[in-house]
């Protein structure tokens, strides 16, 4: 997605200030479906492009964190493989984790974007500089978002967000050029 639409300028301006991207897991990094086997083991599916987008965004200096209402070993393993250090799981009330993150990373709420899909995400979304909802988010989340992705959660929405931030901050062409040599 190329960002040049005049209507997007206020959102682009917010994205230029970002130093931290916070992601929800279920419904954002995954499609929100929960799979359990007969022993109670949980399985999640993550999109490879989302992971690569996170790695590229982090290379430009934007930190990435995860705050999830649920706990899952598969999330811990995936985030470790992506180099994400700030992983908060089992936080149905995400405000305490958000406040801790601001302090740890040393950013203001205006320098933070949050991507969410459900009501648990609203307490953070209403506090950040750029609130983003995935395409298939709950209607109340979409109504309070600054921007909605054109991709569904778990199907490239996070990559769309990462590419958008890199474009807004002027890093995308530099990132792209490394693949065109």
Image (tube, grey):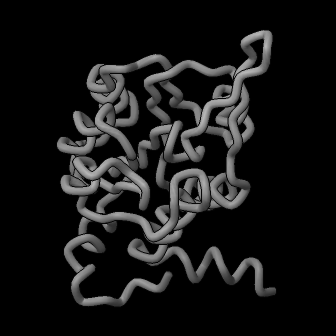
Camera-side residue of 157 and 100 = 157
Question: From what the image shows, is residue 96 above or below residue 141?
Answer: above
Residue farthest along the top direction in this orientation: 39
Horizontally, is 90 left or right of 45 in the view? left
Q: Position of residue 158 (x, y in %)?
A: 53, 57
Residue 41 point in image, percent of width and height: 75, 17
Query: Hey, which quadrant is residue 106 in on the image?
Result: top left
Residue drawn at (27%, 79%), measured in percent from left and top? 8
Picture quarter with the C terminus: bottom right
Give the residue at x 46% y 28%: 68
For this view, does 113 lie left or right of residue 33?
left
Viewer-nearest residue: 135 or 53: 135
Q: Residue at x 52, y 37 (%)?
A: 26
Of residues 134 and 113, which is closer to you in this image? Answer: 134
Give the image location of residue 165, x and y in percent. Answer: 43, 66
Above-or-below relation of 94 to 161: above
Residue farthest front in this picture: 38
120 vs 150, left or right, is left
Drawn side of residue 30 relative to residue 147, left or right:
right
Residue drawn at x 34%, y 51% as measured from the top left:
113
The image shows residue 147 at horizontal and vertical percentages of: 30, 65
Vertical placement of 174 versus 148: above or below?
below
Q: Quadrant of residue 6?
A: bottom left
Q: How many labels sit on residues?
A: 0
């Amino acid at each position: 997605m190329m960002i040049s639409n005049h209507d997007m300028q206020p959102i682009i301006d917010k994205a230029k200030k970002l130093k931290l991207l916070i992601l929800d897991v279920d419904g954002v990094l995954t499609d929100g479906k929960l799979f359990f086997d007969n022993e109670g083991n949980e399985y999640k599916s993550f999109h490879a492009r989302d992971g690569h987008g996170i790695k590229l965004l982090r290379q430009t200096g934007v930190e990435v964190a995860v705050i999830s209402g649920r706990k899952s070993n598969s999330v811990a393993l995936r985030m470790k493989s992506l180099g994400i250090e700030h992983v908060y799981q089992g936080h149905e009330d995400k405000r305490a984790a958000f406040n801790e993150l601001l302090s740890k990373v040393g950013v203001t709420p205006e320098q933070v974007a949050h991507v969410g899909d459900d009501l648990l995400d609203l307490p953070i979304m209403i506090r950040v500089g750029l609130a983003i909802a995935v395409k298939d988010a709950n209607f109340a989340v979409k109504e309070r978002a600054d921007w909605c992705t054109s991709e569904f959660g778990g199907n490239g929405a996070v990559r769309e967000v990462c590419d958008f931030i890199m474009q807004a901050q002027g890093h995308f062409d530099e990132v792209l050029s490394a693949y065109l040599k």
